[in-house]
Amino acid sequence: MTDFPYQIIGFDLDGTLLDTSPELTVSVNHTLGLAGLPPLTQEEIKPMVGLGAKHMLQVGLERAGNSDPEALREYLPILLDHYGENLGSGSPPYPGLLDAMARFDAMGVKMTIVTNKYERFAVKLLTEVGLIDRFACVIGGDTMGKGKSKPDRAPIDEMIRRCGGEPGATPAAFIGDSIYDVMAAHNAGIPCVAVSFGFLHQPVDELGADAIIDHYDEFIPTLERIACL
């Protein structure tokens, strides 16, 4: 037995668990090239990630010079196909993550993924990088149905249920890099830690998270600290 305060830890995927920006940059620029548009840098693409592929491509097209809604409809399937074929080609885990996961395993803490990425892409990515078996469940942006992705509480409640817990009763916490992560966790009544190294759409201290970490070495001590607040 362990006296660690949480039984379940939920992770966002892109920009929290893995740095997926290298392969997302390749897929976005492949699509922009087919549309006759100039490429974007990885740093330009990072803030576009996390709110779904459609949002990412829409902002990418606009940034590259095409705001035509028809272009979005035409090129979204191309982006999805290219990305699906190249998942795991360039998505390293963030420093310290694997050590933190090993400690959670040793304490008997269940780990989950809750992402707004399509579930099939999330599962394939985690499989390609060799982490799929480390998670009790993977919940994607389409898993719960339309309108039931983060920031809705539904996927957070579902991760708790799939781990054998009861929403609102089983102690759980979440970690992410966006306001949607914080809102989803808080809507479900659990704390959220924000990472300063993710694909931030705004300053990390404006997300309203219960705590902020700069490295995964800080994650477990931070969870222990906020459990006492």
Image (spheres, rainbow, N blue to C red):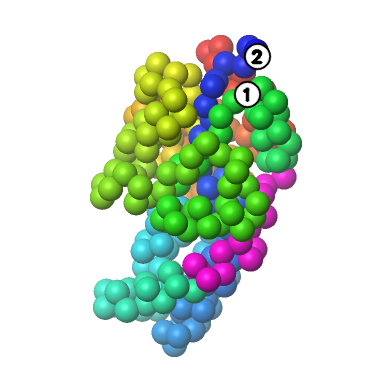
In the picture, the disc for residue 177 is none
User: Is residue 130 or residue 73 the one in the foreground?
Assistant: 130
Q: Is residue 86 magenta?
A: yes
Residue shown at 62% from the left, 16% from the top: 4
Please say if 228 is above or below 180: above
Q: Is residue 10 magenta?
A: no
Q: Residue under circle 1?
A: 108
Question: Which portion, as a residue range, is magenta?
Answer: 83-95
Q: Quadrant of the N terminus?
A: top right
State left or right for residue 39 relative to residue 142: right
Residue at disc 2, secondary structure: loop
Type of the residue with mark 2: Thr
User: Is residue 41 or residue 28 the one in the foreground?
Assistant: 28
Q: CA distance from mark 2 to mark 1?
A: 8 Å
Picture coordinates of residue 161 (x, y %)?
Answer: 39, 29
Type of the residue with mark 1: Gly
Picture coordinates of residue 30 (x, y %)?
Answer: 51, 79
How many neighbours does mark 1 have within 10 angstroms: few (below 14), some (14-19), or many (20 or more)?
Answer: some
Quarter residue 5 falls in? top right
CB atoms at circles 2 and 1 under 8 Å apart? yes
Residue at disc 1, secondary structure: loop
Q: Residue under circle 2?
A: 2
Please say if 51 is above or below 8: below
